[in-house]
Image (cartoon, grey):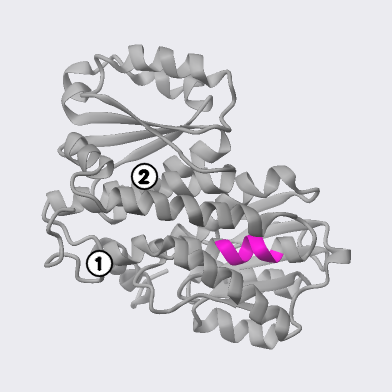
Amino acid sequence: MTSVAPLDTLGMFAATASMPEQIAAGVDAVAEAAAADRIPEPDAITSVLVLGMGGSGLVGDFLAVTAGPFMSLPVVVVKNYVPPSYVDRRTLVLAVSFSGDTEETLSAAAVAAERGGQMVAVCTGGRLAGLAETWGAPVLAVDPAICMPRAAFAAMAAPVLVLLEDLGFFPGASEWLARAAEQLRHRRRQLSEDPNPALRLAREIAGTIPVVYGPGGIGEVAARRWKAQFNENAKTPAFSAALPEMTHNEIAGWGSLEELTARSFSAVQLRHDFEPPQVAASFAFLDEHLSDSVREVYEVRAGGDGPVAQIMDLMLFGDYVSLHLAALGGVDPGPIPAIAELKAALSGPGGA
């Protein structure tokens, strides 16, 4: 591993490495809520709504592509101030906010609760925890010692899956999570070596703008995670897109500015065992099509048993790449001053 300790002021490497342990803590959080007899009544629930932004909002995307295909209930993710108009007592509303103070999530959750939604809060505390108390809703507690929301993904995602299992909507979730934790421990050992594949990839893409492509729902969400981690950890522009959707639009944009893009962009393809079989041909074409348009095309393949393990495995790999990229550029991965400045501006005089 590169020598990053002087610049890693918030301990992002250590927090990222804790993903397997976060899963175990998430399982315990649901058990504590059940012991307090605050788990919602499942019989009347006909839909699931997940509210969240940023790293917390990614929990909803994760839920939709892992549990969603196996559930009889629709899963909708909202990353905004207002929930859908259909929300009522038949809607299970999962309000996910690491800090408990995310403005958009609080606004949408308050409206959902007023409409009778069966509320569940996932947070470390903050105003959301206080509102949950007034609603008589359970709080799936997240460890407040985790340094940043983006480093707490597994701590927020695991209890949501287990809750759905306990309600009878996603049988087998605990087993999928156990397999994910096993794969994450394996990947962590691999990525703790020096050199390792995440460090090598970071060195390869350094100095370029990475574009991350992922197939199917799992690949799309994992690619979105990579993009966000490049933005927040490495403080670099990055973009993501899903296959097959990008083959109907974005692919047409490559090739017209090759003199610029070949110097400035790199492409990373995330592959997994649950991708639609038809996309293999699309990737083969994409390799050829991008060969003169980007500096290089790289592939990262997921490991692990099951969709939950493979999407988390891709996420952990990407997290490490982004942290190594930050270290190579002399960037502290923890603080995110641009976002902090925006929040301060919006909350100050004249702000929204």
| Helix, strand or loop status at disc 1 | loop
Residue 235 in view: no
Residue at the farthest right position: 43
The residue labelled by disc 1 is: 335
Note whether 27 is above or below 37 in the view shown: above
Label 2 neighbour load within 10 Å: few <14, some 14-19, many 20+: many
Q: Compared with residue 152, is residue 235 higher up or lower down, i.e. above or below?
A: above
What segment carries the magenta color? 158-163
Q: Residue at x 68, y 59 (%)?
A: 49
Give the quadrant of residue 205.
Answer: top left
Determine whether, in the image, residue 23 is placed left or right of residue 293. Answer: right
- Residue named by callout 2: 227
x then y, percent, for residue 255? 29, 14
What's under tag 1, amino acid-wise? Pro
x 57%, y 48%: residue: 308
Q: Is residue 65 left or right of residue 190?
A: right
Amino acid type assigned to the residue bearing label 2 in the image:
Lys
Name the spot of residue 262 as percent of width and height, x first: 20, 22
Nearer to us in this view, 330 or 251: 330
The verdict on residue 25 being magenta is no
Residue 5 in the image, given as x and y percentages of width and height: 15, 66
Q: CA distance from mark 1 to mark 2?
A: 17 Å
